[in-house]
């Protein structure tokens, strides 16, 4: 059941991680969870993309952690 949105707000796309405003008149394809680029992508492909994005985010966190432990003070 889609709930009515109170107002436009910044959302993060689940599939590609991009930030977008939703709802946005210029991007009618965008949904609550996916930007205008990813919304038309078939669901099974979006799922793969979501999985890869999660891995990417984990790696980014790990890189940030390694940077601070390997090069403290840099
Ligand atoms: Zn996207």
Image (spheres, helix red, strand yellow):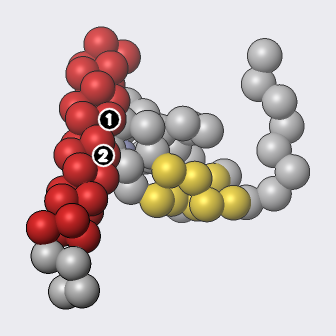
Q: CA distance from mark 1 to mark 2?
A: 5 Å
Quadrant holding the C terminus: bottom left
In-front residue for pair 45/17? 17
Report the front residue among 65 and 28. 65
Element at badge 1?
A: helix
* Rendered image quadrant of residue 16: top left
Check the picture and name the quadrant holding the N terminus: top right
Residue 42 visible in this rendered orientation of the protein: no
Give the labeled residue for mark 2.
57
Residue visible at 43% across and 37% down in the picture: 14
Q: Residue 73: give x, y in percent of width and height.
A: 24, 86
Q: Which residue is mark 1?
A: 54
- Residue drawn at the location 24% of the way across and 35% of the way down: 55
Q: Looking at the image, do the residues carrying marks 1 and 2 touch, with CB atoms under 8 Å apart?
A: yes
Query: Quick one: 49 or 65, which is closer to the camera?
Result: 65
Q: Where residue 57 appears, x then y in whole percent?
A: 30, 46
């Amino acid at each position: 059941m889609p709930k009515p949105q109170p107002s436009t707000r910044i959302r993060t796309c689940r599939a590609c991680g991009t930030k977008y405003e939703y709802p946005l008149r210029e991007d009618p394809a965008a949904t609550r969870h996916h930007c205008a680029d990813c919304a038309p992508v078939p669901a099974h492909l979006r799922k793969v993309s979501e999985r890869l994005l999660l891995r990417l985010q984990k790696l980014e966190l790990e890189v940030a952690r390694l940077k601070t432990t390997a090069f403290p003070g840099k």
